Image: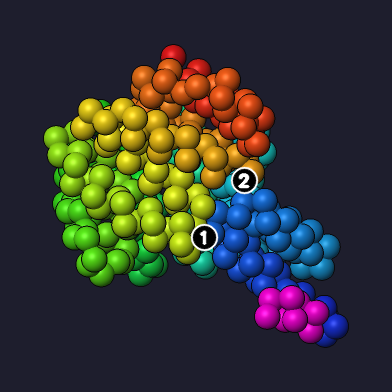
Amino acid sequence: MIAETRRWLQQSEGYYALTWTGYLEGVLHLKRGDYLEARLACSSALELVERELLGHPGQACMLHALLGGIAYEFDEIAPAVEHVERAMGSISECSHADAMIVAYLTQARLQRLRGDDSSALAILREGQDLGQQRALPRVTFSLAAEECADLARAGRYEEAQVVAARFGFNELPTPGGTSGLSSDKALRAASRYLLRQSPKPVVEALDGAIESSQQRGLAHRSVELLLIRARAHKQAGDVASALTDLHQALTLAAPRQYLRVFLDEGPELGSLIDGLDLERLGNSPAGTARAPAATRTGQARQ
């Protein structure tokens, strides 16, 4: 469908609509965790914006936002900074929720990478306010979830709980219950502090979510949830299951070149990294990609 639409728009020289098509294709790939394909779609669309639309600020902003988020995940920090700075320079002209979410998330994560946690939280709160002003609740909700996760990573668990309660994602979804934005954020954010006192319910809640993500082909989400479940298994004393989850996450991530999802979680994964058999990883089919990710994750927590 997208390929057919693109051909028709090219024939009619519908460049504005064509760049929107490229952006939406990038968003769809990004949601599935197909970051390499998303980068290709966004790069092609951005070239078109610059060549045919005189660098239209609104279109360029959305594409730079996605490209910045992708570069960050690949641990390409300098390109990520460049893309995000260009996106944030025109964020007032950005009209799509996904681009706004990725722009603010990436800018905040870059600040956290620089060691400036207070600026990272301020950026997330600024994005939440902008989401409310524009009546885009998904923007506000997603950035609140990132704030919750950030606070939990920093060991500020009570503050993380306050954020989760304020936005209504402070309780884990019941097995077999309806899925939605609140349950998704509870699994990906609130579970980070909930597992400290009650790891087994977190494991049970994540079991179904991971299975669903894998069935739907959502690779990056699967990796993220596997890493959280690994921490919950470890907290419950089941190190063998934790290592199994970590190995599975590395296997999924390797061909897709995910790095930051591991590096950002490095300090929380703790001694699990030391338990990885890197020699066995190196001898496996995906070992050449998995072993460096595991090694760099270990370095990130030192």
Percent across and percent down for residue 267 are 38, 24
Residue marked by disc 2:
256
Q: Is residue 84 left or right of residue 191?
A: right
Helix, strand or loop at mark 1: loop
The x, y position of residue 99, in whole percent, is 53, 59
- Give the number of the disc on residue 162: none
Question: What residue do we see at 47% from left, 35% from top?
Answer: 247
> Which residue appears at 75% of the width and 81% of the height?
4
Residue neighbourhood size for the residue with mark 1, other residues' Cα within 10 Å, grouped as few (<14), some (14–19), many (≥20): some
* Disc 1/disc 2 C-alpha distance (Å): 13 Å
Answer with the quarter of the image where residue 90 lies: bottom right
Quarter of the image for residue 158 reads: top left
Looking at this view, is 130 or 67 the one in front?
A: 67
Mark before the other along the chain sequence, 1 or 2 = 1
Q: Position of residue 61 (x, y in %)?
A: 61, 57
Judge whether 171 appears above or below 49 on screen: above
Which residue is pictured at 35% across the width and 33% down the height? Answer: 242
Mark 1: amino acid: Gly
| Circle on res. 217 | 1
Disc 2 element: helix
**Front position in the image: 152 or 140:** 152
In this orientation, which residue lies closer to the viewer: 114 or 272? 272
Q: What's drawn in magenta, residue-wise? A: 1-9
Residue 142 horizontal side relative to residue 32, left or right = left
